[in-house]
Image (cartoon, rainbow, N blue to C red):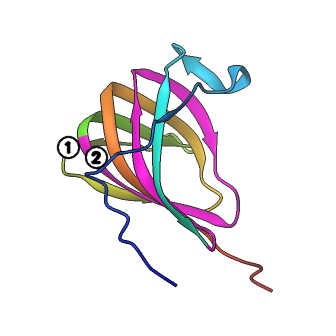
Amino acid sequence: MHKTLATFSDLNTPPVFDFPRPERLVAGNPQRATWTRFERDGMSAGLWGCEPGAWRIAFADDTDEFFHVLSGRIRITDEAGLAREFGAGEACVIPAGFKGVFEVLETVMKHYVFVKRGDMR
């Protein structure tokens, strides 16, 4: 079986566009674009961009996200009210089960990696 590198600089697939679900919106109605570059065995990675706006997030109990901001600025606020901001060159892991508000302060582009773990029993 031939294996091919999944490069991020060669975006030869069109993005998938979406918007936050209306019941999760906090501010605006930002359009989001996702270029998935790799998917296999519970892991996906790619490039994600979004316009300014804010919405509530609730991560599944089995899925973590690592991201690295390329441009723009975001703020993530947890349920206890602790807010952290991330700009170009900064990275973070959003842990499984996290709930809070995701806010795009300046149009953002980021690399992302989602890891979904199998049954942990």
Looking at the rendered structure, the kind of residue marked 1 is: Ala
Q: Earlier in the sequence, mark 1 or mark 2?
A: 2
In the picture of the structure, the residue carrying the numbered disc 2 is 69
Tell me what residue is drawn at x 73 percent, y 23 percent: 23
Residue numbers of the magenta segment: 41-70
State whether the magenta stretch is mostly helix, strand or loop. strand
Helix, strand or loop at label 1? It is: loop
Q: Which mark is residue 88?
A: 1
Camera-side residue: 111 or 78? 111
- Count all numbered tags in the image, as a single digit: 2
- Please provide percent x and percent y for residue 117: 65, 74
Tell me what residue is drawn at x 65 percent, y 58 percent: 97
Image quadrant in which you'd find residue 60? bottom right
| In this rendering, position of residue 44 left or right of residue 21 | left
Marks 1 and 2 close (CB-CB < 8 Å)? yes
Camera-side residue: 116 or 39? 39
Looking at the rendered structure, the kind of residue marked 2 is: Val
Q: Residues within 10 Å of mark 2 (few under 14, many from 20)?
A: many
- Please provide percent x and percent y for residue 20: 61, 27
